[in-house]
Amino acid sequence: MSYDAEATRRRIFEAATAEFSARGLAGARIERIATEARANKQAIYLYFGGKEKLFGAVVRAKMDEIGEATDIDPARLSDSVGQLFDWYQEHPELIRILLWEALETPGEVQGEDERRAAFRQKAARFTDTGRGSRDVQDLMFTVFGLIAWSFAVPQLRRLILDEDDADAALARRRATVVETARVLAEAHRLA
């Protein structure tokens, strides 16, 4: 049986995603990642260059993943927001990793320029609506916050929404976020 480097990279990446999501950058351990990935620590350093670079690679890949899986369409903003909400519900690890990134990497984060450019590109799709880029960026950040907060603080979602059924609470929250995005878009003349 031959060594499959790509399969090893993929296992390391999946193990690292779970480890960073659960424990953050400071709490993550290369040993746990290697054990879970059925790889040796040297492979992690060889393929990713160390824990900090691996964390940055995980963040960038998860951001790319959501960017490829969802589309913010100015003509269908409410649908786009619902799609984003659903993606975060299926992939709660991204919110956790972004929270860890905010807590543990003050200042500029890895890949910041590329990530900023990707958001600018998304915002540029809205400029045909007659709104300025800053207005669109503010709206995007607000809508992302509405979506992410539902998953960043699930304990508050349970307490404030006061639903016995977690699925019902999340469905209600989704409907509220989609409607709020629609109203905000209309106020900004984007819908």
Image (tube, helix red, strand yellow):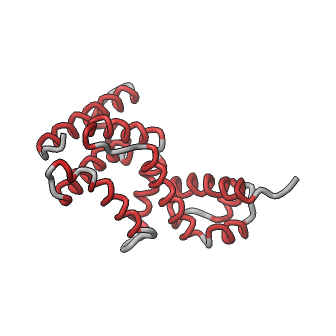
Residue placed most toward the observer, 175 or 68: 68
The number of numbered discs placed on residues in the rendered structure image is 0
Q: Residue at x 74, y 55 (%)?
A: 38
In the image, taking residue 141 as reference, residue 8 lies left or right, namely: right
Question: Where residue 76 sits: x, y (%)?
Answer: 27, 37
Q: Which quadrant holds residue 72?
A: top left
Q: Is residue 176 above or below residue 97?
A: above
Q: Which residue occupies the foreground of this view, 41 or 72?
A: 72
The C terminus lies in quadrant:
top left
* Front position in the image: 55 or 117: 117
**Residue depicted at 48% across the width and 43% down the height:** 91
Q: Residue furthest right?
A: 1
Residue 94 in percent (x, y) is at 45, 51
Location of residue 74 (image quadrant): top left
Q: Position of residue 59 (x, y in %)?
A: 48, 59
Q: Position of residue 185 (x, y in %)?
A: 18, 42
Q: Is residue 170 left or right of residue 9?
A: left
**Location of residue 100 (image quadrant):** bottom left
Image point 56% across, 54% down: which residue?
A: 17
**Nearer to us in this view, 172 or 109:** 109
Q: Identify the residue at horizontal 31%, vertical 40% (top origin).
A: 81
